[in-house]
């Protein structure tokens, strides 16, 4: 491990900090490997229920570190394909892990850094936050790192096309009005706001939280209303048979906090 991803435990919450501040947390091979290992391992860690993702220093993440030496014995085409696939798989693992991910954006989130924000479940931004899909600015296609999947679903086709076809930055206010972020929070209060939301999530049953993220993921691409409701019905039938559901009902009626046991 290169120490380019710092993990801090706060009970059942973990804070994952991109830790390359001198490079604006740009994605190096070491950081990519650590992100893979971390998000790929979360499915087997029921002790972690919520993840907060943030960047150290002046910004969230500047995208791929294009100054890093990635030379190898591979042909250039295969080397580029490996880089593309390796970074892209981070976003797949973020969506697949059962823990909700709260991203805290400050400074710039560009290219692959923007996609780290997009792959999270909830996004908060500091007033100075700005983001772009940078790829078309360096002679590549504007659709990269799942931007053509995430952006239209989050902000609609018009703003997604504007960002992807120009590479222009949008600021925190526009990100908020478009629904890309949930709230603008003073930079020095971002972590506290993220932790407060995480604590609200911890008040839910562990399996209720996990299956709710799963259903949201599946139903973004649901083929029909019937298909979406079938996923919801499956979730509710499973959860209604759990001991934690009985405990939640008893706690609600007894006006006390629930004591969940199923992990």
Image: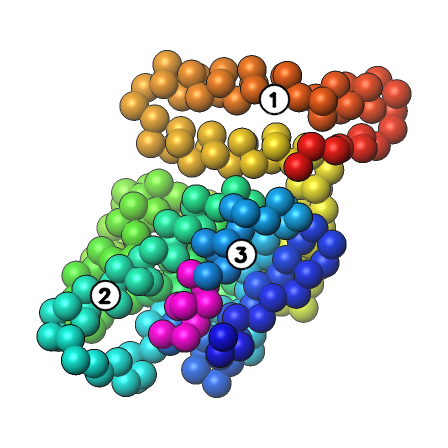
Q: Is residue 257 above or below residue 3?
A: above
Residue 35's spot in the image, x, y percent? 45, 63
Q: Earlier in the sequence, mark 2 or mark 3?
A: 2
Residue position for label 1: 239
- Mark 3–mark 1 Cα distance, whole angstroms, equals 28 Å
Which structural element holds mark 1? Answer: helix
* 134 in magenta: no
Residue 103 numbered mark, or none:
3
Q: Can residue 137 be seen in the rendering of this structure?
A: yes
Residue position for label 2: 82
Q: Earlier in the sequence, mark 1 or mark 2?
A: 2
Q: Is residue 260 above or below residue 162?
A: above
Dot 2 alpha-carbon crowd within 10 angstroms: few under 14, some 14 to 19, many 20 or more: few
Residue drawn at x 53%, y 77% as measured from the top left: 3
Residue 24's spot in the image, x, y percent? 45, 78
Q: Nearer the viewer, residue 223 or 136?
A: 223
Mark 3 or 1: the one toward you: 1
Which structural element holds mark 2? Answer: helix
- Magenta segment, which residues? 29-36
Residue drawn at x 50%, y 54% as measured from the top left: 41
């Amino acid at each position: 491990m290169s120490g380019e991803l710092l993990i801090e435990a706060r009970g059942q919450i973990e804070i994952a900090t991109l830790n390359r501040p001198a490079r604006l947390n740009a994605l190096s091979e070491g950081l990519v490997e650590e992100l893979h290992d971390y998000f790929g391992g979360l499915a087997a860690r029921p002790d972690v229920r919520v993840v907060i993702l943030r960047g150290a220093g002046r910004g969230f993440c500047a995208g791929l570190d294009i100054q890093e030496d990635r030379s190898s014995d591979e042909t250039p085409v295969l080397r580029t394909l490996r880089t593309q696939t390796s970074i892209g798989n981070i976003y797949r693992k973020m969506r697949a892990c059962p823990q909700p991910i709260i991203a805290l954006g400050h400074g710039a989130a560009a290219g692959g850094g923007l996609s780290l924000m997009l792959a999270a479940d909830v996004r908060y931004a500091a007033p100075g936050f700005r983001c772009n899909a940078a790829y078309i600015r360096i002679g590549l296609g504007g659709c990269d790192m799942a931007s053509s999947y995430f952006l239209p679903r989050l902000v609609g086709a018009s703003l997604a096309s504007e960002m992807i076809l120009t590479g222009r930055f949008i600021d925190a206010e526009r990100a908020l009005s478009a629904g890309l972020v949930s709230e603008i929070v003073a930079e020095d209060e971002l972590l506290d706001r993220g932790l407060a939301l995480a604590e609200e999530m911890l008040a839910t049953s562990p399996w209720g939280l996990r299956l709710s993220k799963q259903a949201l993921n599946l139903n973004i691409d649901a083929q029909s209303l019937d298909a979406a409701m079938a996923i919801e019905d499956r979730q509710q039938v499973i959860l209604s048979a759990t001991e934690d559901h009985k405990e939640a009902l008893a706690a609600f009626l007894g006006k006390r906090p629930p004591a969940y046991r199923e992990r």
